[in-house]
Image: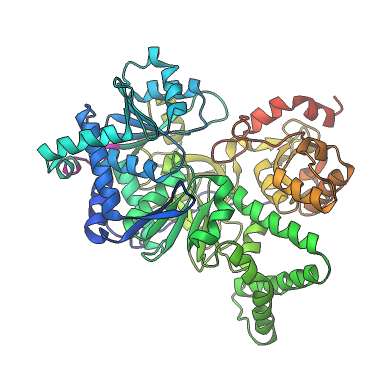
Amino acid sequence: MTEAPSAGRTTGSLNEPYPKPADNVGQLILDRVAKSGPEEAFQAPTEDGGWRSYTWQQVFDEASEVAAGLVSIGVEPEQRVSIASNTRLDWIIADYAIMLAGAATTTIYPTTGAEDVGYILVDSHTRVLIAEDMEQAEKAEENKDNLADLQTIVLMDGDGNGDNILSWEELKAKGRELLAEKPDLIKDNVAAINGDSLATLIYTSGTTGKPKGVELTHSNWTYEGASMSALGVILPDDVQFLWLPLAHSFGKVLMCAHLQVGGVTAVDGRVPKIVENLPVIRPTVMAAVPRIFEKVNAGVMRQVKEDGGAKEKIFNWAFAVGTEAHEKEAAGEKVGGLLAMKVNLADKLVFSKIRERLGGRLRYMVSGSAALSSDINTWFQVAGLPILEGYGLTETSAGSVVNRPGAIKSGTVGQPLPGTEAKIAADGEILLRGPGVMRGYRNRPEANEEVFGVEEGWFATGDIGVIDEAGRIKITDRKKDLVKTSGGKYIAPGAIEAQFKAHCPLAGAVVVIANNRKFASALVALDPDAITQWATTKGLADTSVEAAAKNPEVRAEVQAAIDSLNGELNHWETIKQFQILPRELTVEGGELTPSLKVKRKVVEEEFAADVDAMYGG
């Protein structure tokens, strides 16, 4: 797993053209409505289980009413309006409204606890909270004695109280009244917004301490939309499936790309509904975090093993043929003759059926937020489902680097977006500069010095990586997560964990432990869906994760996966011991961030006894 050094090497796409960004996000909205007003813009689920279509004009009209409603209750330019809601069309309308009002959106994950909600509302000086329902509103109510700036709560679902809580319809009614008096209100607001004005305040979900507020400007987002459109990731006739948390920068950057390019976005944040929605929406583009791709891969592989016999042999033959062709193409060789005929047959018998499970029309999928196993990425490519793995941080407006359509290199996150540069510092840290980099952390001068003080003009990402001869970046680990064994050998746990997912379909998450230890070990959390299917094939009905963790056959499967993984690692990186945890890791339990990344320190502390057991107490 050792990489060739590339310290000092710089890569960028400064000469790669992209459209001139809009002056601000509000103008981006106005431009899209002027161009595509009567065209379909969104699809959203209805209460009866169906789907409803919305035009750009319909969404703009509602957002304008909400924007004017915010102005009518005293919201001023750059004042913060927080949104605490799951992903749904109303979230997007609320954000559009805040942009059109000239205010700034503060995002709050719906899973955030009352204490952290209070902290965010206070630190951001939020003036209005738009809450999905009373459950979200009550988190603010629990902190009301400390919320001097919070004047009004608006409920997407539910009734107002005639005092400081307004319903969605009541806010829109206020907006209609003001628009009747001032019909040019929205246009005038947008004209007054500067590109450097605050647009979004996103609090990072750190593993320790209080979250930091990342200040992102209008020009950050309009740049992202313009540069993404230049790459052809999203096209005007695409149907995008957006389920990602909109409180996360990954979701927001997809919203900006949609505004820039047009097309249709189907919005439904209910994660358990993803698989059910795919054949209904039949998207052409979908972004996801690695865990979703891992689950799809694991589900297919489990089904193949369950089928066994001739079906399993045909499946394995197809992927062997497809992999051979993929490797030839990656080496620049032409695939023809008998191999091409075999690939066509493999596609008909196997690959086309996998694509149908995902709706049958996907041109590309985009992966971000965490490392994706190169083996899983290649598996999808062989099946005719290209994944454009990308890279960015909340601090860089989510999108900084991405693999280009038609030029995917598994194991890398691609090249910088047009207008962005990257280079490797002497210690291996990735540095970025470009129009997507944040204004700074709110009220955190020391934190700003930490990321902007490494080298003038560059943002220090905290990630370790290398740049290859083609200018593609490979992330090897988090700088703070790089650990050293007691024998003095460095290990990158994140890279090992990503590789393990491709070897063990039963695993939902894994945490590699090695810092100041004699050897590397692992805590393995099982995936409930995988265990349910595994148990069914074994005739073990209603087997819980806790029971499966004690099952010798499950342990044997995990051991086999670790043995396979160890064959790919340097000897000092190999996993010598492991423990299977008695339950899954969850966002609600505090072990995962809302973007499904493992909180390593939390897991190590929570299961300290299991860790000690692996090292002899």
- In the displayed structure, does residue 156 sit left or right of residue 61? right
Q: Does the magenta segment cover residue 191?
A: yes
Furthest toward the bottom, the residue is 337
Could you tell me what secondary structure mostly forms the magenta stretch? loop
Residue 578 visible to an observer of this rendering: no
The residue at the point 60 percent across, 31 percent down is 588
| Image quarter of residue 261 | bottom left
Nearest the eye: 294 or 328: 294
Nearest the eye: 231 or 149: 149
Task: Give the percent coordinates (x, y) of residue 357.
Answer: 61, 63
The residue at the point 43 percent across, 31 percent down is 133
Furthest toward the left, the residue is 181
Furthest toward the right, the residue is 552
> Which contiguous range is marked in magenta?
190-198
Task: Give the percent coordinates (x, y) of residue 40.
Answer: 33, 60
| Image quarter of residue 213 | top left
- In the displayed structure, does residue 101 sit left or right of residue 363? left
The residue at the point 44 percent across, 22 percent down is 138
Task: Give the percent coordinates (x, y) of residue 299.
Answer: 69, 55
- In the displayed structure, does residue 283 sit left or right of residue 480? left
Q: Is residue 125 above or below residue 36?
A: above
Q: In this view, does 41 lie above or below 338?
A: above
Nearest the eye: 141 or 11: 141
Task: Give the percent coordinates (x, y) of residue 85.
Answer: 44, 36
Residue 190 visible to an observer of this rendering: yes
Furthest toward the top, the residue is 145
